[in-house]
Image: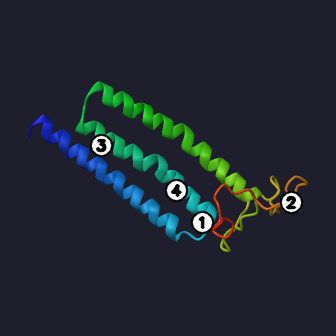
Amino acid sequence: MEQNDILMWLSALFVLAGSVVTFIAALGVLRLPDFFMRMHAATKAGVVGPSLLLIGAGFFDPSWSAWITIFLAILFLLTTTPIAGHLIGKAGYVGGVDLWGGTIRNDLETVLPSSTFTELETPSTAGHAPADTMAHPETTPDP
């Protein structure tokens, strides 16, 4: 077996693994019963799936510039996705998203107040229709 054949098999293996992880996470987003569980599945797949796909692309084109780009992309995923997932989860919890009925323990209950936000009218928008840049058919004059 040649080196090119080994690299091709490694590339195929990592691309297949990344695709499977991403597919399982997509099923989790569709099937899990709770906003927080779905968010967890999406953020895990947002790091692991694309990282495996990028590594597979690196084995397909094993140049230094490709590996440096892949390393930087994976580093970006590892630093931004957990932070974004944390902030989305916190916003959902503070915003009053209901927990799944089977949830046994809520450690944030005593630390972070959960409430439902309600929209309040501000004096600048009270009594005014929302601005719309599109012309409505009923307001345009007939030619």
Q: CA distance from mark 4 to mark 1?
A: 52 Å
Q: Which residue is mark 1?
A: 143
Q: Which residue is mark 4?
A: 42
**Foreground: 128 or 142?**
142
Q: Quadrant of residue 62?
A: top left
Q: Between label 3 and label 1, give the one nearer the viewer.
A: 1
Q: Position of residue 107 (x, y in %)?
A: 74, 57
The amino acid type, in three-letter code, at marker 3 is: Gly
Q: Position of residue 14 (x, y in %)?
A: 30, 47
Q: Residue, x 32% and y 26% (percent of image)?
A: 65
The amino acid type, in three-letter code, at marker 2 is: Leu
Q: CA distance from mark 3 to mark 1?
A: 60 Å
Nearest to N terminus: mark 4 or mark 2: 4
Answer above or below: position of 44 versus 4: below
Answer yes or no: is residue 29 visible. yes
Q: Residue, x 14% and y 37% (percent of image)?
A: 4
Q: Residue furthest right?
A: 123
Q: Which residue is mark 2?
A: 120
Q: Between label 4 and label 1, give the one nearer the viewer.
A: 1
